[in-house]
């Protein structure tokens, strides 16, 4: 049978598609395992210089597969949760947020629970006009996972984060844009092309600089200015030693456009 997570290379872009459209791309065990493996592959592949995460069909991802989850809860009680979060959601969340290249969520439809949380950990969220976000956790008596306690307050502030986590309910693309969750709202049928356009541009960029910017911004979110300055100095030393930096300065001085190779 066809895999529930597809990955396609479009130039330097790794396009990851959650592919259980009949289940609104809910994350059952097999899909969580496959998604983690695919993320590990694209993270390690130097030929992939930007990653796009999207879904097939009318949803982006509705989080945990509650049919499978319900059956497992019935059978073995909450033990399943104690394994699923540390063994599946945590490494998936970490990779989405820390792999050394930009990650874009192309939110093609509703993103709920862990699905919304995954989108929050991407660098950019291009959101289809008909899509939305639903912090579904509390509606089923759960707290929150996949980094949403960390990412959502950073996007919208702690008060709005609590409001969204308490309330459940789906917010639309325009409200997501107003709140700072969506970086851009795109007509439904243009989303994939737009995501590939933005991703293609990033994939043609200075990948190591982008990776270091990603790390610097994440690091600075929980440190003092003094520590952030020291970290920036390290990252500048690293990126200053790259071939991309050397040739881009040369290109600047010669008044021609730089050609970045990611090296
Ligand atoms: O073990 C652990 O670690 C737990 C970890 C949990 C992480 C999590 O992600 S918890 C959060 C899980 N997700 C949810 O609670 C979302 C539940 N879904 C919804 O709230 C709504 O379906 C949506 C807001 C996402 C979409 O609403 P709408 O009106 O567009 O669609 P719908 O009619 O509610 O759903 C359509 C079908 O998809 C429906 O099935 P049916 O009636 O056509 O047979 C519905 O049951 C199914 N569906 C939706 N979400 C899930 C799902 N089936 C399984 N798992 C789902 N998450």
Image: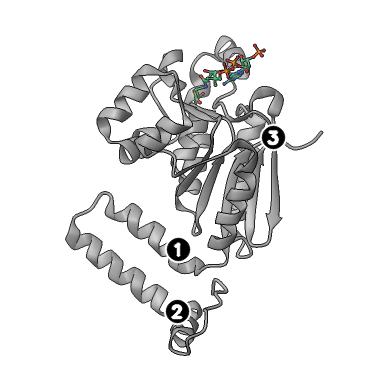
Q: Nearer the viewer, residue 174 or 114?
A: 174
| Extreme-front residue of the structure | 187
- Check the image and report above or below for 163 versus 180: above
Instruction: Indicate the secondary structure of the residue bearing disc 1.
Output: helix
**Is residue 84 among the parts visible in the rendering?**
no
Residue at label 1? 210
Q: Is mark 1 within 8 Å of ligand 1?
A: no
Please name the residue that numbered disc 3 is placed on. Answer: 19
The percent position of residue 223, horizontal first and vertical second, equals 23, 53
Q: Disc number at residue 245?
A: 2
Image location of residue 234, percent across then percent down? 32, 70
Instruction: Identify the residue shown where x is 69% and y is 56%.
Output: 9
Is residue 247 in view from this perspective?
A: yes
**Kind of element beneath mark 3:** loop
Q: Nearer the viewer, residue 65 or 130?
A: 130
Say if 94 sits above or below 12 in the image. above
Residue at horizontal 50 percent and vertical 29 percent from the top: 132
Instruction: Residue lying at the far top in this picture: please name it.
Output: 74
Upstream in sequence: badge 3 or badge 1: 3
Q: Quadrant of residue 142?
A: top left
User: Extreme bottom residue here?
Assistant: 254
Task: Indicate the position of residue 66 as horizontal and vertical percent values.
Answer: 58, 18
**217 to 212, vertically: above or below:** above
Residue 215 horizontal side relative to residue 108, left or right: left
């Amino acid at each position: 049978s066809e895999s529930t997570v597809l990955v396609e290379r479009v130039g330097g872009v790794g396009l990851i598609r959650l592919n259980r459209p009949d289940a609104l791309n809910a994350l059952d065990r097999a899909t969580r395992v496959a998604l983690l493996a695919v993320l590990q592959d694209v993270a390690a592949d130097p030929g992939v210089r930007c990653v796009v995460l999207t879904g097939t069909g009318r949803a982006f991802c509705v989080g945990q597969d509650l049919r499978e989850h319900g059956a497992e809860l019935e059978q073995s009680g909450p033990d399943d949760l104690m394994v699923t979060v540390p063994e599946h959601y945590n490494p998936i969340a970490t990779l989405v947020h820390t792999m050394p290249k930009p990650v874009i969520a192309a939110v093609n439809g509703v993103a709920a629970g862990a699905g919304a949380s995954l989108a929050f950990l991407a660098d950019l969220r291009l959101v289809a006009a008909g899509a939305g976000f639903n912090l579904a956790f509390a509606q089923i008596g759960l707290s929150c996972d996949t980094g949403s306690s960390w990412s959502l307050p950073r996007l919208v502030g702690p008060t709005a984060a609590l409001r969204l986590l308490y309330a459940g309910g789906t917010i639309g693309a325009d409200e997501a844009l107003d709140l700072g969750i969506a970086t851009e709202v795109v007509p439904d049928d243009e989303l994939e092309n737009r995501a590939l356009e933005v991703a293609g541009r990033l994939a043609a960029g200075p990948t190591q600089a982008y990776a270091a910017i990603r790390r610097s911004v994440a690091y600075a979110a929980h440190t003092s200015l003094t520590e952030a300055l020291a970290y920036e100095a390290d990252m500048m030393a690293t990126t200053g030693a790259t071939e991309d930096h050397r040739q881009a300065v040369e290109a600047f001085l010669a008044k021609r456009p730089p050609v970045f190779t990611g090296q």
